[in-house]
Amino acid sequence: MNKRFATELLHWTYNAPYDFYNNEFTTETLKEILDNPYQAIVNDKEQLVGYFCTGISAQVPSGHIVSAYLDNYIDIGIGMKPILTGKGFGTVFFSFILSQVQREEHAPLRLTVATFNTRAIHLYEKLGFEKKLEFKHQATRFITMLKI
């Protein structure tokens, strides 16, 4: 990840209901991305198509209250460029991320997804993740999913 890609992804705008994933560009959000394990995913023209992060950056803070993150798993968070979503690229995109993470890490995988995001949940189940724990953060319900 570099400053150019981090700045670009912080300006991505998703349509409702996925606008929940829109970010606000601030010095703090830019620093969060640049100082943590975020990886840019680019196409053959060096254009940003998505990103992933691992570790605490991929966790939802309220999940700690309900012990969602106690076990020894690698947490994964992902984001795809808004104009590419909903077009059937999810399986290839997430499979690439999984191969990258599993090449470096050998622990089981975990992700956290908003329960309204049925499109993503379907993709994760298709790639072997199973629903584990549901919890609420502010007004949104989340679910952790595991791949062992």
Image (tube, rainbow, N blue to C red):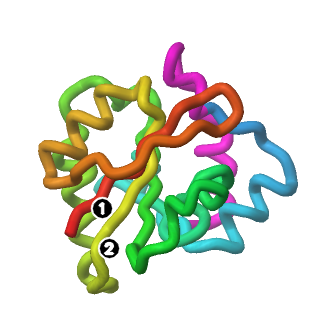
Q: Is residue 47 visible?
A: no
- Magenta segment: 1-21
The quadrant of the picture occupied by the C terminus is: bottom left
Measure how far apart labels 2 and 1 are at the Cα level: 6 Å
**Label 1 is placed on what type of residue?**
Ile
Given the current orientation, which residue lies at the most extreme right position?
27
Q: Residue furthest top?
A: 16
Queried whether the magenta region covers residue 4, the answer comes back as: yes
Q: Which residue is tagged 1?
A: 97
Up the image or down, 23 lies above or below 40; here it is above
Residue 52, image quadrant: bottom left
Q: Quadrant of residue 32?
A: bottom right
Q: Residue 27 in the image: state x and y as whole percent.
A: 86, 54
Q: Can residue 105 be seen at all in this image of the molecule?
A: yes
Q: Viewed as shown, does residue 1 lie left or right of 109?
A: right
Dot 2: element: helix
Residue for point 70% across, 73% down: 35
Q: Quadrant of residue 118?
A: top left
Residue bearing mark 2:
101
> Residue 129: where, in percent of width, then height?
22, 53
Marks 2,1: beta carbons within 8 A? yes
Q: Nearer the viewer, residue 135 or 40?
A: 135
Query: Is 10 contained in the magenta span?
Result: yes
Q: Amino acid at mark 2?
A: Val
